[in-house]
Structures are given as C-alpha cells and as structure tokens.
Image (cartoon, rainbow, N blue to C red):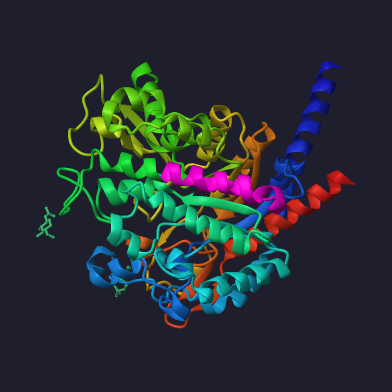
Amino acid sequence: MVFYTNLKSMFVEILFIFLLLISFSICPQRALSNRFDPSPLSTNFLFGTASSAYQYEGAYLSDGKGLSDWDVVTHKTPDKIKDGTNGDIAVDQYHRYLEDIDLMEAMKVNSYRFSISWARVLPKGRFGEVNSGGISYYNRLIDALLLKGIEPFVTLSHFDLPQELGDRYEGWLSPESQEDFVYLADLCFKSFGDRVKYWATFNEPDYLITYGYRKGIAPPFRCSKPFGNCSEGDSEKEPYLAVHNIILSHAAAAYIYRTKYQAEQGGKIGIVLHFDWYEPISNSMADKLATERARSFTNNWLLDPIIFGEYPPVMQKILGDILPKFSNNNKEKLKSGLDFIGINHYASYYIKDCIYSKCEPGPGITRTEGLFQQSAEKDGVPIGKPTSIDWQYVYPQGMEKIVTYVKTRYNNTPMFITENGYGELDNPNNTEEQYLNDFDRKNYMAGHLLSLLEAIRKGADVRGYFAWSLLDNFEWLQGYTVRFGLHHVDYATLKRTPRLSANWYKEFIAKHKTEVFRQEK
Ligand SMILES: *[C@@H]1O[C@H](CO)[C@@H](O)[C@H](O)[C@H]1NC(C)=O
Ligand SMILES: *[C@@H]1O[C@H](CO)[C@@H](O)[C@H](O)[C@H]1NC(C)=O
C-alpha cells in the first residue's frame, strides 16, 4: 500500500515535471506569463519611451532657435565629445516627428517623454522675445501625439540651456537663474498646459551639477583641483550653490503651476533624478551607514528639501556652512513641492565606508562628496553581468530595491520610471542582423520590468515606465558611440529600423492591456 502510494505520487510528480518542461519549451512566454499574472498595473499605467531635445531634435538654428550651451560647447571644443560630434542634426526629430510617432504607435505605447529646448522657445532666456517658431513646433508635436492617443510627458529642462544664461551667470550659479526658470515654466504651462498633463521640471540635476561644477567635464566646465582641470570653479562649494538654485527653481515653478494653472489644467508636476541602487559592500554598520550617506549625497540631497523642506541631516552635519540655508519663506514653498518622483534607473553599485576604513585618497571619496566609495565589484566579482558600457552591469533586482527605498522614505509618493535602458558600444563592423537582434537589451528590459512589477505588487505607487530610448541618439559626452535605441538609426541616412526589443516591448504592453482588461471585466 505504502509502496503503491509512493509509486503513484512519484508518477504524478514525474508527469507534472514533464508537463512543466513541455510548457517551458513549447511556450516559454506562457510559462513566463504565469509570473505576472495577474497584472498589478492599472488601466492608465503609462508605457512609453523617453528622449530629450538636444539628443533628438537637430534643427539647431531652425525657425528662430537661439544657441544653447551644448551647441556652443560642441562647436567650440569638439574634443570634449568622444567622437567630436554634436547635435546639429542628431536624429532630426524636428523634421521627422510624424514618422517617429508612427513608430510609437506601432509599439502601442500610450506616452512619450520629451523635453523642451529652452533656446528654441526663448532664444535669449527672459532677456529676449518668445520664439513663435519654437512654440509652434511643440504645438505640432503635442497635437500629433494626442491624435494617436499618446500622452505627452514633458521635461522643462533636460541639460541644455540658452547660452545667454551661461554667459550671464554660468548657468545655475546665480540665484537669478531661478527667475529664468520660472519664466520658461510659466510660458510652457501657458502655451501647452491645456494638453500636457505631466510636467517634470528638471532631468537629473544631481548628475548634471556633478559633471558641470565638480568634475568640470560638462558645461559650464567649472571645477577646482584635484577634482578636475578647469580654468575656474570650486568643486567643493559650487555644486551645492548650483543645486540650491535648482531646488528653488523647481519649487517656484511648482508653486506657479499649483496656484495659477493646476486647478484648471488638472496636470501633475514632479522632478526626475538619476537613481542608482546602492548596496552596502559588507554587513558592517559602517558600510550600511555609508550606503545611506550615498543616498543622501545624491538623491535625497534634492528630494528631502523638496518634500520635507530641509537638506538631509547627515549632509548638514558633514558639510556645515558649505550647504546653503533655506529661508522660512522658501521652506513654505518647498513643503510637498511635487506630485510625483521621476526615477531614471540604469545601474547598481556597492558602497564602502571611508570614515572608519581606509580608502584610496583623492576625488570620489572626499568629505564634500560624502566620504564613501562606490564600486561595481566586490572581491573582484561584478554586481551583475557586465556589458560593453563600462558603468553598466545588469542587476535587475536594483529596480525593485530602489523603488521600494523611495516608496519608504517618501511615504509612497507616486513614482514614474522616467528612464531605464541598455546601452551598447557602437561597432561599425556589426551586420544588420547583429545590430537589430538586441537580445541583451530585451533581457535587460524584461528583467527590470519584472522586478518593477514585484515592487508594484508589494504596494509601490508606480504609474508609468519609459524605456530609454525610442531611437539611438546623441549621448552627450559619448556622442554617437553608444546606442540605447529600441530602434536602430543609420546616421548616414537617418533611417529608423525597429530592433527585436521594440517588438518585445510591444508584446509586453499588449499582454498587460489584455490582462488588465480581463481582471476588470
Ligand atoms: C589641463 O588643461 C590644460 C589646458 O586645457 C592642458 O594644457 C593640460 O594638459 C591639462 N592637464 C591635465 C592634467 O589634463
Ligand atoms: C572592425 O574591423 C576592422 C577590420 O577588420 C578592425 O580593425 C576593427 O578593430 C573592428 N572594429 C571593432 C570595433 O571591432
């Protein structure tokens, strides 16, 4: 009897494993689909792709556009860009936006994240006229998107700014820059806010400022030794001044939106930051504290003031007088100064403490940078699968972890994944088959999306996901040497071709739509 039961259960088990194997081999999507069934996403979840003006538009002097700092830098000092190129043409979205919207429609995305070229709408900032040619371009783009059911998700400032503001006060160093930003924001709310319901004030100012004012390798190229090689600047102080002005610029724009436009237009306003995931390199208390310090010196640096009205206490303690202060008046404007947090997530790193343990001295670990060391390896083992990009290792769990961190620290403020993507070094020897069959990008997206769904299932209020990027494009200091597109771009002809990842994304979106539909019936 006992023997019989065992035999029977053994048979049942073998049959079960056999069926499981068959289902995996015949129908891998099916087996995978059980893992996201039921979909935790709401019907209005935004699936989109992301872009930015300077990286995409081209048309750098068309229809009255003024010069941006990136126009000037790429022309005057092309050696600062890896391949000596610029965004004069980029992927020419200014002239090809209808074709690009067709590509979006083919993927069935319901949102597109793009940025306003500040110098296109205000060639001299607030010191000149509004350029009607620029306003008209964004009107055409927005209308064409809406016609296809694609929500515009607009970033007001994505790195490029009018050269006029660079000349007048080195970008964000002067408190006057706040007035300039509010002037831009007000113009955009007034001109486009009847149709645009998602506004991000800034893209990755944490990153921009570190590159522009500490390392001095991006406009306005300010730094001091030993942090970098610049003619002017102060790497220990200026990043904190510049970010202070950016925080206050954000707060002032959000205040205007809320008091003057939001009731009527009904949109949301937030900010987009660059969120790497940080993992303590050991279980020691020192490394755990260092990891929290790393969060403070990168993202909480901006989010704490915008949401709580104060810089993180640990920054105040370490930086002392270097950190500017908020007046009581400012603090009032700052409290709860956003409707959503935009998360650009690409990579994860280990963090090691440099207060109690020894670190290689020099830039990267200094007091004004937070006294921690970041690395992608622990005991010679990388945190995830290496890629052709030196800073990118594939660690999908980082997505769930960073979203959960932000959820916990900021009381589940609504979040959007405003960028997530996989870069590949361009190899001109690749055959068409090689550059279109981007299995690695597809796997990266699948892993990160599954990880995101897990965070959402556990209660994170995430309302959208934007893949970086719709197309290969001008990747700032890397020029055209790195490709992130779901569509390949032939830079000689500007022809766009969907990669495997574009088709995979389309299927992923379609599946979620059916599941959500099924659940709601
Ligand atoms: C620093 O910049 C100057 C001027 O551009 C250049 O001549 C020099 O070689 C640079 N030094 C280093 C260490 O990069
Ligand atoms: C492309 O091919 C050439 C000629 O075979 C070779 O010298 C070069 O290193 C290759 N480039 C890359 C990036 O693999």
Q: Is residue 345 left or right of residue 143?
A: left
Q: Position of residue 324 (x, y in %)?
A: 33, 34
Compare residues 173 and 339 and report the one nearer the observer: 173
The residue lying at 34 percent from left, 60 percent from top is 165
Q: Quadrant of ligand 2?
A: bottom left
The residue lying at 74 percent from left, 48 percent from top is 23
Q: Which residues are magenta?
A: 246-272
Compare residues 327 and 343 and report the one nearer the observer: 327
510 to 412, vertically: above or below: below
365 to 252, vertically: above or below: above
Q: Position of residue 519 (x, y in %)?
A: 84, 44
Q: Is residue 372 left or right of residue 154?
A: left
220 to 356, vertically: above or below: below
Q: Position of residue 473 (x, y in %)?
A: 45, 67
Report the predominant secondary structure element of the magenta stretch.
Answer: helix
Compare residues 8 and 232 and report the one nearer the observer: 232
The residue lying at 37 percent from left, 73 percent from top is 428
Q: Position of residue 491 (x, y in %)?
A: 43, 77
Compare residues 82 and 150 and report the one nearer the observer: 150
Residue 83, picture quadrant: bottom left
